[in-house]
Amino acid sequence: MHTYLTRGLLLAAFSSAAITTQAAEDSTQDDWKFAFSPYFWAAGISGDVGQFGLPKVHTDTSFDNILSDLDFSFMGIAEARKNRFSLFADIVYTKVSSSASSPRGVLVDHVNLKSETFAGLVGGGYAIAQGSRGTLDLVGGVRVWDARSKMSFKGGLAGDRSATDSDTWVDALAGFRGKFILGNDFYLSGWALAGGGAADLDWDVAAMLGYDVSDSVSAVLGYRALGVEYEKDDFVYDVVQRGPTVGLVLRF
């Protein structure tokens, strides 16, 4: 039972976070520039989780196992930049379903676990270094987490029953985001953020290689790692997610 529950809960954590780029690079421009970046993060997850009053358990789940139970996900970044100032938002929503049959079918015939996870980061930044080859921003913001799980039991002596467990928390983060132009339409970008609040620790790092397909479209490939240490009563979410990212940057 613990193995099944762990797998389902960790699928819900599949998420998030983020491919980004600067919406504009010319510090002499006074107009707002905007960018939207839909992306996909093929992250595995490891750590300790606990819900429904059960003891926390450790897991190490690959992305292949997560993908098999994925129902729906949305990941995207929106950014606005004017001269040295920037605003940004990174949203990750994931819905997963996992199920298992009881080997004996006495107490229960079938168990279903449905989980939804939302992680949203909003913040702003100021370019402490900016030139023709790139920018380095000092940034700060808040990340809102919301995790919800519903466990349903079907058949057997227990009959049809269900239970729901959820929690929402907010963390403050600060750090750096940057972009460096390599030439021949290639560039490097990335970020490093850390903080906490309701969580003891919330951190996020990434490195990306981008290619400008045109003046308004770029393709981005990279790697991201995100960790959070949160525990309240019997709700435990102490995990690290890591894996490759791929996406587009649409500028307008």
Image (cartoon, helix red, strand yellow):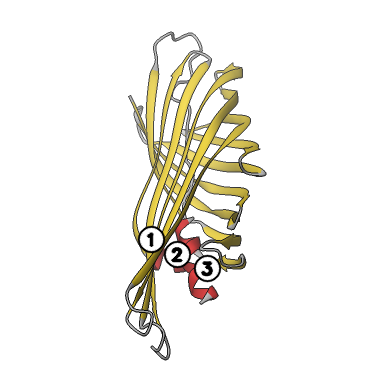
- Circles 3 and 1: CB atoms closer than 8 Å: no
Q: Residues within 10 Å of mark 2 (few under 14, many from 20)?
A: many
Instruction: Find residue 124 and report its horizontal and vertical position in percent.
Output: 52, 23
Q: Is residue 14 above or below residue 172?
A: below
What residue appears at the point 57 percent right and 62 percent down from the top-left corner? 50
Which image quadrant for residue 54? Answer: bottom right
What residue appears at the point 61 percent right and 54 percent down from the top-left corner? 233
Q: Amino acid at mark 2?
A: Ile
Nearest to N terminus: mark 3 or mark 1: 3
Nearest to N terminus: mark 2 or mark 3: 3
Q: Which residue is mark 1?
A: 96
Q: Which residue is mark 3?
A: 6
Q: Amino acid at mark 1?
A: Val
- Circles 2 and 3: CB atoms closer than 8 Å: no
CA distance for labels 3 and 1:
13 Å
Nearest to N terminus: mark 2 or mark 1: 2
Q: Nearer the viewer, mark 2 or mark 3?
A: 3
- Circles 2 and 1: CB atoms closer than 8 Å: yes
Q: Is residue 189 above or below residue 68?
A: above
What residue appears at the point 55 percent right and 49 percent down from the top-left corner? 223
Instruction: Find residue 239 and report its horizontal and vertical position in percent.
Output: 60, 55
| Relative side of 97 to 28, left or right | left
Which residue is nearer to you in this view: 218 or 230? 230
> Residue 180: in sight, yes or no?
no
The quadrant of the picture occupied by the C terminus is top left
CA distance for labels 2 and 1:
8 Å
Q: Amino acid at mark 3?
A: Thr
| Relative side of 231 to 212, left or right | right
CA distance for labels 2 and 3:
12 Å
Which residue is nearer to you in this view: 88 or 221? 88
